[in-house]
Image (cartoon, rainbow, N blue to C red):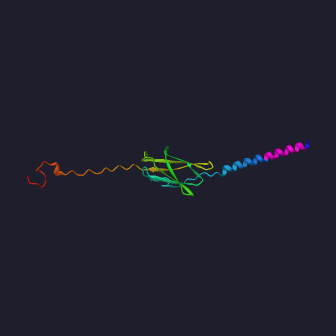
Amino acid sequence: MKIKTNLLKTLLLVNLVLSSTLAAAAGDEKKDCRKPRIKSVTPPHLSEVQPESEFTFTLPVWANPEKVTMTVKKIPTELSIENHNSFFLARGKIPPQLSATYARFSVRAEAELGCVKHDGWLYKIAERAEQNTPAQPEADISSAMPAGNAPGQPQ
């Protein structure tokens, strides 16, 4: 009976040690997951930009390019993401409906291991430049006058 009690205590102790080791390992796995950091935002944060202009930013190689989303002033915005081997370069354009306003650019990036990073910046979007309509050519005055009354002609 004494042997069974010692064996039972030993098994419980081994079980306790194993479960605490597994719990610690699971906790370490979460710590190893690095959130993708958004860097090299161009134009920089708080810049004044033209309507429909292009912006870029970089993401680390451990980011999942298929799980990067962006909104500009809550408007979903399309990004093209290029692999440059040591980083990803994301390009986008300011939505055409935005001008003469401030807009928050919000990025959600997910790492390959599942960690998520939310980041963003603010731009002042300039007023849309008025379309320059070509000036009307001046009308030929001589064609507007009745025949025989053109300037420089004797009457």
Quadrant of image for the N terminus: top right
Please tell me whether residue 9 belongs to the stretch shown in magenta.
yes
Q: Which residues are magenta?
A: 3-16
Front one among 90 and 35: 90
Q: Residue at x 84, y 46 (%)?
A: 10
87 is higher (above) or lower (below) than 69: below
The single residue placed furthest to the right in the displayed view is: 1
In-image side of 154 versus 144 (left or right) = left
Q: Residue at x 79, y 45 (%)?
A: 16
Q: Residue 66: x percent and y percent?
A: 56, 48
The single residue placed furthest to the left in the displayed view is: 155
Image label count: 0
In-image side of 147 versus 82 (left or right) = left
Q: Residue 21: x percent and y percent?
A: 75, 49
Q: Residue 95: x percent and y percent?
A: 45, 47
Please tell me whether residue 148 belongs to the stretch shown in magenta.
no
Q: Residue 116: x percent and y percent?
A: 60, 48
Q: Residue at x 72, y 49 (%)?
A: 24
| Chief secondary structure of the magenta portion | helix
